[in-house]
């Protein structure tokens, strides 16, 4: 009975051209994926340039940095969006503040310059850099 049922199902699939239709769908899917990869290549290139300019990888390939939904939804075309995405990368625990340990882990700069830069960002010297303090030093958010 099972063999007869299998044969009947295969015959019905052949009669309806299911396999050919699945091949067409698969080819269309592959074309769409290729087109999407091509269309987003510019974004990957922009992120690589930004990564080089800030001194650490904004698009990690080894999974060491957290992937923030906030960072993914940022508009990287604007200075404010890039600034917010960078802050999100530094803020590894997601508390909307960057402490010295988070800043040091980012490997933005090395040695004493790292502490000096952190102090420059931490305008009230409370040991935490808020999003506002970060934006005030890194990007002029005014139009």
Image (cartoon, helix red, strand yellow):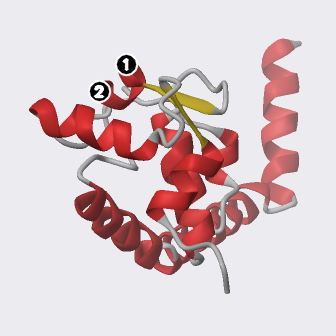
Residue at point 39%, 73% (across, down): 46
Q: Nearer the viewer, residue 22 or 110?
A: 110
Q: Residue furthest front?
A: 124
Residue at point 47%, 31% (across, down): 125
> Can residue 67 be seen in this snapshot?
yes
User: Looking at the picture, does residue 64 appear above or below residue 130?
Assistant: above
Q: Residues within 10 Å of mark 1 (few under 14, many from 20)?
A: few
Determine whether the residue tagged by mark 2 lies in a helix, strand or loop. Answer: helix
Quadrant including the C terminus: bottom right
The residue where tag 2 is placed is 104
Image quadrant where residue 101 sits = top left
Contact (CB < 8 A) between labels 2 and 1? yes
Quadrant including the N terminus: top right
User: How far, Cα to Cα, is label 2 from label 1?
Assistant: 5 Å
Q: Nearer the viewer, residue 1 or 112?
A: 112
Q: Residue furthest bottom?
A: 143
Q: Residue furthest top?
A: 1
User: Looking at the picture, does residue 47 appear above or below residue 19?
Assistant: below
Q: Residues within 10 Å of mark 2 (few under 14, many from 20)?
A: some
User: Looking at the picture, does residue 35 appear above or below residue 47?
Assistant: below
Relative side of 6 to 109, left or right:
right
Task: Indicate the position of residue 78 as horizontal and vertical percent values.
Answer: 59, 76
The residue where tag 1 is placed is 101
Task: Indicate the position of residue 104 as horizontal and vertical percent values.
Answer: 29, 27
Residue at point 55%, 35% (across, down): 67
Relative side of 84 to 59, left or right:
right
Q: Nearer the viewer, residue 16 or 36?
A: 36
Task: Indicate the position of residue 141 as horizontal and vertical percent values.
Answer: 62, 73
Task: Indicate the position of residue 10 as horizontal and vertical percent values.
Answer: 78, 40
Residue at point 63%, 61% (across, down): 26
Relative side of 19 to 129, left or right:
right
> Can residue 60 be seen in this snapshot?
no
């Amino acid at each position: 009975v099972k063999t007869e049922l299998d044969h009947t199902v295969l015959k019905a699939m052949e009669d309806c051209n299911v396999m050919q239709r699945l091949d067409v769908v698969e080819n269309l899917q592959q074309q769409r994926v290729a087109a999407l990869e091509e269309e987003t290549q510019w974004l990957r290139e922009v992120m690589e340039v930004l990564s080089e300019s800030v001194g650490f990888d904004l698009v990690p390939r080894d999974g060491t940095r957290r992937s923030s939904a906030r960072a993914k939804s940022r508009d990287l075309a604007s200075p404010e969006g890039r600034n917010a995405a960078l802050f999100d990368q530094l803020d590894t625990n997601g508390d909307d503040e960057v402490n010295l340990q988070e800043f040091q882990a980012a490997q933005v700069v090395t040695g004493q310059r790292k502490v000096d830069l952190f102090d420059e960002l931490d305008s009230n010297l409370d040991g935490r850099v808020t999003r506002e303090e970060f934006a005030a030093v890194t990007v002029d958010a005014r139009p």
